[in-house]
Amino acid sequence: MKVHLPAGTSSWCWVLRDVERPLLAVVPDQYRLSEFVSDWKVLFPLEEIHILSEIPLTEEHLRSEATRIERGSAVEKWNATGGCIVTTPSAILAPLSLPSAGVEIDVGLALERDRFLEWAAGSGYSRSDLVWQEGQYVSRGSIVDIFDPSYRLPLRIEFFDDRIESIHLFDPESQRSRSPVGLTRILALTGGIVKRLDEMLHPDTGIILFEPPALERSVEAYQWIWNRMADDGGADPLISWEEELGRLSGHRRTSVTRIVQGSDLRIPVMEVQSFKGRLEAAESVVRGWLEEDFEITLYSSSELLLQWASEIGITPREGALSKGFVDRSEKKVFLSDSDLVGVTPASREGRVSRVPPREWEERIGELDFVIHEDYGIARNLGIERVTSDGMDRDCLVLLFAENRRLLLPLVQLYKITPYPAFSGEDPPLDSLRGTVWKKASLKAREKAREAARQILALYAERETSRKEPLPPDGELVEKF
């Protein structure tokens, strides 16, 4: 079936609200996937959206078993819970793997740290100074960081004697621990079972292809690059998109496109016009919708726009849609920042970007003075290995006033920032026992919040202000 829908990703999400699950939504590229995931979370905050990501076109990722297992785990989770999974045609063609083994861990479980490290090394995980991408692990004293590809974030496991003391997810960029984790299973990265996506689909899965011509253009470029790299790196080449569609022919399939010719069905959903900061014009259109008994909702990240919406009868909600739309059959209107002022906050939903950080030792070696978020300015004395309770761990040594030292574990380096050296003079050191720093930092945070509010108001005024255009060039300018 071919469906005509003259709108973008937010409308794509909307028209899927009542479609029978399980559902495979295919969008042209990673940018559109990111918008789709962001819009879905705004419109349907209670329904989880699953993501099957592409394999990045690098030699490392083409050979990475961790990347393939991450993709296979994503499909397994979707199969177990149902719902909707969004992907691209390039991600559908690329291979995935299912793990063949793993180990269960839990808080309080009797498990020797050295035995766990032996298992990680023998199961395909690579040792690293910092864990920042799937398939890496590192041990610092009693703490082990490991990135199981079935998780969106790596795990931090703390051992005490021969038992697991705690398990947390942590942010690989800041190294800051996040939410605690209970009983979990860490997957092995060796002996994975290679699968194709079409082999894992439930027989009742419906497939929605958004903008088929764009799908073909996108996957053609990806396939060409992959196959050229595969020839040099020993990976298997990808089949054509046409052949893959043939494998998927046994599933109910619908194409959604802006092209009206040849459509079997036209959905009465259309994009909202762009007002480009002309709120008076927007109010006029809104009054017309209200007279027709439309229910209007504004999703915005601007307090000023949300207040404006509530004053004229629009339901204000915090959030960011890529684009607004009108559903005439449901008599609903959804507005966005993009419709009103032409600005949409950038979305990183659905994107997985792993950038290797610089080594901690390299960073720390460049700093003479640092600022600890809890205690203030200190002199950096470098990294020292400390033995505690029979465990060795690396700590950053900070010298404060009164010649007092603080040993900061490397996993807490997110608490320090470089001290800006405005002059050649050494700054006065803060005291570990004093309260001056805490009072000053609270005051500075309040000033920063006030400055942010003023900047937001300024940019909102710039976006909504109007100015008469300059007159056309005269004869004198033309001669010049």
Image (spheres, rainbow, N blue to C red):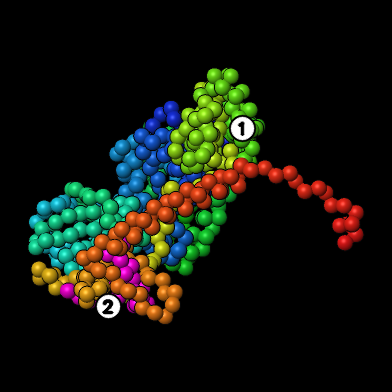
Q: Is residue 424 visible?
A: yes
- Marks 2 and 1 sit apart, C-alpha to C-alpha, by 60 Å
Quadrant in the picture for the C terminus: bottom right
Q: Main secondary structure of the magenta part?
A: strand
The stretch in magenta equals 363-386
Please report the residue visible at 16 percent of the width from the left and 51 percent of the height from the top.
106
Circle nearer the N terminus (2, 1): 1
Image mark count: 2
SS for callout 1: helix
Q: Is residue 166 above or below residue 113?
A: above
Indicate the amino acid at tag 1: Ala
Residue 283, picture quadrant: top right
Horizontally, is 4 left or right of 159 in the view? right
- Decide which of 353, 345 is in the foreground and name it: 345
Is 366 inside the magenta-drawn segment? yes
**Residue at image location 33% in from the left, 67% down from the top:** 371
Residue 335 image offset from top left, x and y in percent: 54, 34
> Picture coordinates of residue 214 (x, y %)?
58, 45
Camera-side residue: 433 or 101? 433
Q: Callout 2: 10 Å neighbours few (<14), some, many (20+)?
A: some
Residue 374 counted in the magenta span: yes
